[in-house]
Image: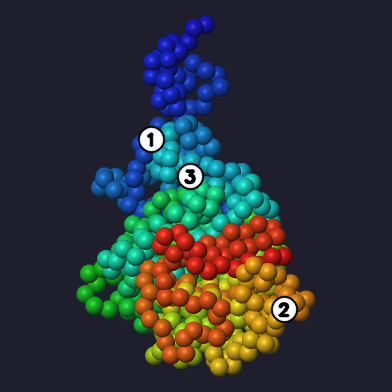
Amino acid sequence: MIKPIIPVMTAIGLVLAGCSNSNNNNDDNNAVATCSGEAVQAVRLFLQQLSSDSVIIKWRGNADGDTEASSVCFGTDMAALPADSETAATVTATGHSEVLLSGLEPDTTYYYSVGGAGVADEAHHFRTAPVTGELPADGNTRIWIVGDSGVGGTGKPESGYVRDGFLAFAQNQGDEPADLFLMLGDNAYDQGTDMEHQKGIFDVYTSVLASTPVWPTIGNHEMGTVGLSTSSNPESYTVLGDGSNGGPDPAPDSPMPYLNIFSLPTDGEAGGLASGTEQYYSFDYANVHVVSLDSQLAIRDTDSRAAMMQWLKDDLMANTQDWTIVIYHHPPYTKGSHDSDSTLNGIDDPIFTIREEFTPIFEQYGVDLAYAGHSHIYERSYYINGNTGLSDTFDAATMAELNDMNMPASGQGDEAYTQIARNGMDDKVVYTVAGNGGKITYTTPGYPHPANFFSQLELGSVVIDLDENQLEASFVDVNGTVLDSFIITR
Ligand SMILES: [Fe+2]
Ligand SMILES: [Fe+2]
């Protein structure tokens, strides 16, 4: 039987071949009915809680000003998203639509259409995580980290330069996009309003967010009041001034936009131990375990700090991943725009708490890397442990991994670090401050901090590439040039 579609396909070629529709389904027993909705360009679009079998797609708005999308279609063939994949969105009190896609195959690329079209836009895809503990098919996990990047709302383009630096690096280094995107807080200046999140995050990282899951932590500017809040209660979120860049979110959600915008795991949805709160959480990706702590709110209250600390210990004890990374906002070793030797009106108290109470946990429980922002600078430590005091107590001879000449090792060349250090223990951590993702400001007396191998007032971000046996962390500037790097092998 001659199928009537054949001459038409010959005439129109690939366009029609890639756009099956309900009219020709009966012509081919193998054809699957495809979605028939219309793609909608959302004002904000991002991926949350990506795991080996699920992901949340979240969006809001329609760039055309028309009706917002109410569903998503997805599939492994970008040219034919099956009709039975259509998933209706739920809408939150702040108008965010989200769909949870589950039952997915691990380490597999899926394409999606917000609005439920049968064909996906090229930019709209995600790759599920590998089976936990295993490497991705390409053998390499790439993690991109930016800190204090939320300057979009203040009219500064610097975060865009940093983004472009990363994209240039990624293109030069295997043309490999990031598998994970971590944000170190102060993601939306000055007061973390919903509008400032739009300008600081969604308008800047649009293409990355459409294909890479974002995992943030809370900075002081996420709590309104121009970053000056010392409250431990997210319900206290308020803004100073005329609110021309937005105000608290409406009830019944939290007044804190960060908590409404991000859908973060509370129950170990993407691995790790259930934290019971979006303020801090952990997850697994391939052979990496990532922990995001709340150094702005939970840390300031005795009870909530104790709860977070116990959760952290339990989470790290249960962790069997090859590599462990912790992110939080307040840096324990810094001489940038914040000084880890002095508290600034109480807003910097968490710097001391992190150093005195949390770094011993990181070191005891096998954390490899710790990242903070807050200081608008890049500072990277030696491979250290035991420095809970002020900068003048740092003793390289006893606290740092040493090279063959008994000097603190650089982590570079033949001074690469090993996860099991010379003392036979996995008890050392490289601490990095990467608050240089949107601005660089100044240094404070005593700069550079003696625990830090490399310190530079330069815009940029961090890229981590890792496999089973080696991890390399690089400081990438706005041109995509690597200004510092170190290696840990295991
Ligand atoms: Fe900060
Ligand atoms: Fe900041």
- Asked if marks 2 and 3 touch (Cβ < 8 Å), the reply is no
For residue 273, which numbered disc appears in the image? Answer: none
Q: Is residue 236 above or below residue 155?
A: below
Three-letter amino acid code at the position of disc 2: Asp
How much space separates mark 2 and mark 3, taking CA atoms? 48 Å
Q: Is residue 430 visible?
A: yes
Q: At 69% from the left edge and 78% from the top edge, which residue is drawn? A: 403
Q: Secondary structure at mark 3?
A: strand
On the image, the x and y values in percent for residue 53 come to 60, 49
Find residue 15 and report its horizontal and vertical position in percent. Answer: 40, 25
Mark 1 or 3: the one toward you: 3
Q: Position of residue 271 (x, y in %)?
A: 62, 60
Q: Do the numbered discs 2 and 1 sit on residues whose CB atoms are within 8 Å?
A: no
Return the disc, 1 or 3, that comes first in the chain's sequence: 1
Label at residue 37: 1
Residue type for callout 3: His
In the image, residue 3 above or below residue 17: above
Residue type marked 1: Gly
Give the SS element for disc 1: loop
Nearer to me, 485 or 124:
485
Q: What is the distance, in whole Å, between disc 2 and disc 1 at their CAs?
A: 65 Å
- Relative placement, left or right, of 2 versus 152 is right
- Between circles 2 and 1, the one closer to the viewer is 2
Query: In the drawing, what numbered circle is on residue 404?
Result: 2
Q: What label sits on residue 125 in the rendered view?
A: 3
